[in-house]
């Protein structure tokens, strides 16, 4: 049975928006190994509609990062949306209707992780509906001061820290699971 695993580059003040503007000075081999391990454990990728629109346009046309582009383009992908009628990106399936039931069925069908990178709105919904199995945060030692935060106007969600590592760059690699209490 698959797990839904969410991954974020996140600042000390909770910002997850536009990590390309603040994240790269902290990139090192330790972080690269964690990101690569996550990609290698993926049976599929899951994303919300906004991220799908951005990534499907970028990864199918970019000349840069061809190794990553090929990986993402060939991967099995699922996009959560009740407004997207057709997904043109290779190997993409739209998850709509009773999304919670459909994702639970998907988790039963797959082995490995259903990896997410970004899609904060979708992650909040998954957490609120008991569908998120793990939350991986790469907490960067920077306060960005503006931008969308992972948790904005959300109910309380108890989480349990199950793994932590500090990188030489000062980035914290934290893994949480929902804590049913």
Image (tube, rainbow, N blue to C red):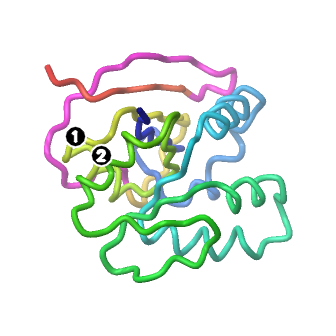
Residue 137 magenta-drawn? no
Q: Quadrant of residue 131?
A: top left
Screen quadrant of the C terminus:
top left
From the viewer's perspective, is 29 left or right of 145? right
Say above or below: 68 vs 135. below
Residue at 19%, 50% in the rendered image: 154
Look at the picture and state if 134 lies above or below 70.
Answer: above
Q: Nearer the viewer, residue 106 or 3?
A: 106
Which residue is denoted by mark 1 in the rendering?
130
Magenta-drawn segment: 149-171
In front of the other: 123 or 100: 100
| Depicted 90 relative to depicted 34: above or below | below
Label 1: which secondary element: loop
Any mark on residue 104, and which?
Answer: 2
Please provide percent x and percent y for residue 169: 68, 27
Q: Is residue 52 left or right of residue 100?
A: right
| Residue in the image at 19% along x and 47% along y | 129
Residue at (63%, 58%) from the top-left corner?
A: 21
Magenta stretch mostly in which secondary structure? Answer: loop
Q: Quadrant of the N terminus?
A: top left
Distance between the alpha carbons at the discs numbered 1 and 2: 10 Å
Q: Position of residue 11 (x, y in %)?
A: 48, 43
């Amino acid at each position: 049975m698959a797990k839904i695993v969410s991954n974020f580059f996140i600042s000390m003040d909770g910002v997850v928006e536009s990590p390309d503007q603040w994240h790269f000075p902290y990139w090192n081999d330790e972080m690269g190994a964690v990101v690569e391990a996550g990609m290698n454990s993926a049976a599929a990728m899951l994303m919300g509609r906004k991220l799908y629109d951005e990534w499907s346009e970028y990864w199918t046309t970019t000349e840069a990062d061809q190794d990553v582009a090929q990986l993402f383009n060939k991967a099995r992908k699922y996009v959560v949306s009740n407004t997207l009628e057709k997904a043109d990106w290779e190997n993409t399936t739209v998850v709509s209707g009773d999304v919670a039931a459909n994702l639970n069925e998907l988790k039963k069908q797959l082995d490995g992780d259903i990896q997410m990178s970004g899609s904060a709105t979708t992650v909040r919904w998954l957490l609120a509906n008991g569908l998120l199995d793990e939350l991986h945060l790469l907490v960067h030692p920077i306060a960005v001061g503006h931008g969308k935060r992972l948790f904005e106007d959300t109910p309380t969600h108890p989480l349990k820290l199950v793994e932590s590592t500090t990188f030489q760059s000062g980035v914290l690699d934290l893994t949480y699971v929902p804590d049913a209490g």
